[in-house]
């Protein structure tokens, strides 16, 4: 039996997001409207709205719904920003960000996943303002910099200097930083030439690949 996906996404938002203090109504609306089930492999589609990350192959995952929502909320997007996402994966988080702002550049280092993200975004009609780039996102994407906000969907050993260089002032970065298997989700802001940060939560992401990631 095929689930009523609109109902499943509504439950996901109410139980997993609102009850865990996600308050940005624009984020909640995007998470409810965007068909998460279209961004996961067909053989695990029934689990699309569960409170877990999902394996998408190539030792990569689509983050649990709460983490996607939290990262989007932490960026405090108002609608006119240009956002860089590092780690396109299946394209889901980029679709959410695309619903919140004017332009998203999502960078993926694995060719097959870059193609998958393009196909998923196109099929769901979410490619209007989202561009998928095959490149090493750990060093950003200078061709279209600077960015008003940057979201990194993989755990880094430290904050890549290139990302801070490509960030507008004022601007904001959300990135998991720490060991390979355990990180803290940092919200970093650049303001008046100063860099400050806070820790939003503890987390566990797949390792960031590339020149400024884990080798």
Image (spheres, rainbow, N blue to C red):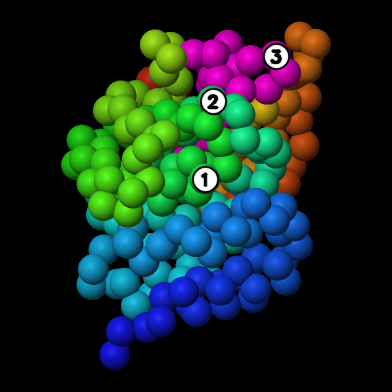
The residues tagged by marks 2 and 1 sit, at their Cα atoms, a distance apart of 12 Å
| Image position, residue 90 (x, y; %) | 33, 49
SS assignment at label 3 = strand
Tell whether position 174 is magenta. Answer: no
Q: Residue at x 76, y 30 (%)?
A: 197
Circle 2 packing at 10 Å, graded few (<14), some (14-19), many (20+), is: many
Vertical placement of residue 6 versus 82, above or below: below
Q: Give the quarter of the image for residue 175.
A: top right
Query: Is disc 3 surrounded by few (<14), some (14 to 19) or many (20+) residues within 10 Å?
Result: some
- Spatial distance from mark 1 to mark 3, Cα to Cα? 23 Å
Q: Residue at x 46, y 74 (%)?
A: 6
| Residue 27 x/y as whole percent | 62, 52
Residue 130: quarter of image: top left
Q: CA distance from mark 2 to mark 3?
A: 13 Å
Magenta segment, which residues?
145-171
Would you say 135 lies left or right of 140 here? Answer: left
Give the mark nearer the N terminus: 2 vs 1. Answer: 2
Q: Secondary structure at mark 2?
A: strand
Residue that mark 3 sits on? 169
Q: Residue at x 62, y 35 (%)?
A: 79
The residue singled out by tag 1 in the image is 99
Question: How many numbered callouts?
Answer: 3
Quickly name the residue at label 2.
Answer: 82
In the rendered structure, are the residues bearing label 2 and label 3 in contact, judged by CB atoms less than 8 Å apart? no
Q: Residue 31, image x and y in percent?
A: 54, 59
Q: Nearer the viewer, mark 1 or mark 3?
A: 1
- Secondary structure under the numbered disc 1 in the rendered image: loop
């Amino acid at each position: 039996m095929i689930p009523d996906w609109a109902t499943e996404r509504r439950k996901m938002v109410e139980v997993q997001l609102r009850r865990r203090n996600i308050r940005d109504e624009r984020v909640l609306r995007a998470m409810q409207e965007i068909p998460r089930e279209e961004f996961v492999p067909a053989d695990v589609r029934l689990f699309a709205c569960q409170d877990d990350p999902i394996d998408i192959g190539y030792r990569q995952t689509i983050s649990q719904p709460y983490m996607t929502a939290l990262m989007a909320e932490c960026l405090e997007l108002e609608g006119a920003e240009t956002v860089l996402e590092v780690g396109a994966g299946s394209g889901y988080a980029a679709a959410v960000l695309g619903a919140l702002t004017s332009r998203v550049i999502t960078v993926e280092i694995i060719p097959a996943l870059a193609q998958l993200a393009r196909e998923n975004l196109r099929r769901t009609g979410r490619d209007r303002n989202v561009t998928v780039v095959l490149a090493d996102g750990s060093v950003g994407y200078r061709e279209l910099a600077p960015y008003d906000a940057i979201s990194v969907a993989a755990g880094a050993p430290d904050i890549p200097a290139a990302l801070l260089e490509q960030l507008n002032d004022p601007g904001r970065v959300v990135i998991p930083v720490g060991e390979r298997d355990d990180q803290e989700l940092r919200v970093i802001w650049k303001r008046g030439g100063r860099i400050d940060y806070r820790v939003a939560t503890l987390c566990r992401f797949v390792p960031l690949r590339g020149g400024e990631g884990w080798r």
